[in-house]
Amino acid sequence: MNDCIFCKIAAGEIPGNKVYEDDQVVAFYDLNPAAKVHLLVIPREHIANMMEINAANSAVVAHIFEVIAKLAKELKLEKGFRVVSNCNAYAGQSVFHLHFHVLGGEQLSLTMC
Ligand code: 5GP
Ligand code: ZN
């Protein structure tokens, strides 16, 4: 999608401090971290949010969770971490490209993200 910041990060058009990428998924550090470790994991494909997940594109979501498990081990988050995906206005979604926040590295409060 032309005007989407996360599509641009996935494509390497703007820098994103990536920690992982493959043909389907990109993971990078959040610009404004809400915890000591705050990653965003996104599909390369532009999907606006969880309302747009369907039978044709849902395989990438399973892959995202495999990547999250791998990164959680690499980043030593075994004491605990949280995965959040905000969907639409009431949840405070600000970037309309599906993304999963991964928060960890410290004791988390219930208000983070
Ligand atoms: P949302 O509010 O949509 O759930 O989360 C969007 C997240 O994207 C926010 O935590 C925000 O800090 C992050 N973000 C917005 N623009 C950029 C950017 O250009 N680069 C990175 N790395 N993170 C961004
Ligand atoms: Zn996008």
Image: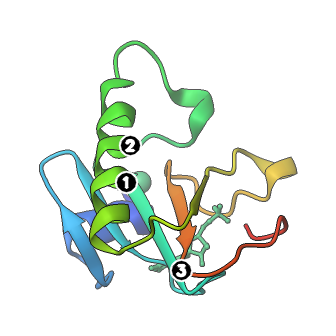
76 shown above or below 61 = below
What amino acid is at disc 2?
Answer: Phe
**Is the C-beta separation of discs 3 and 1 under 8 Å?**
no
Residue 14 spot, x, y in % from top left: 29, 81
Query: Within 8 Å: ligand 1 and the Cβ of disc 2?
Result: no
Q: Secondary structure at mark 2?
A: helix
What amino acid is at disc 3?
Answer: Gly
The residue shown at (35%, 51%) is 69
Which circle, 3 or 1, is nearer the viewer? 3
Residue 45 visible in the current orientation: no
Residue 72 spot, x, y in % from top left: 38, 63
Upstream in the sequence, badge 2 or badge 3?
A: 2
Check disc 2 and report the residue beneath it. 65
Q: Nearer the viewer, residue 93 or 101?
A: 101
Q: Is residue 56 left or right of residue 77?
A: left
Check disc 1 and report the residue beneath it. 68
Q: Kindly report the distance in space between the C-alpha atoms of the residues bearing marks 2 and 3.
A: 18 Å
The residue shown at (74%, 46%) is 88
20 shown above or below 49 = below
Circle 2 Cα neighbour tier, 10 Å, few/some/many (<14 / 14–19 / ≥20): some
Check disc 3 and report the residue beneath it. 105
What amino acid is at disc 1?
Answer: Ile
76 shown above or below 71 = below
**Is the C-beta separation of discs 2 and 1 under 8 Å?**
yes
Residue 101 spot, x, y in % from top left: 55, 61
The residue shown at (37%, 73%) is 76
Quadrant position of ligand 2: bottom left
Q: Kindly report the distance in space between the C-alpha atoms of the residues bearing marks 2 and 1.
A: 5 Å
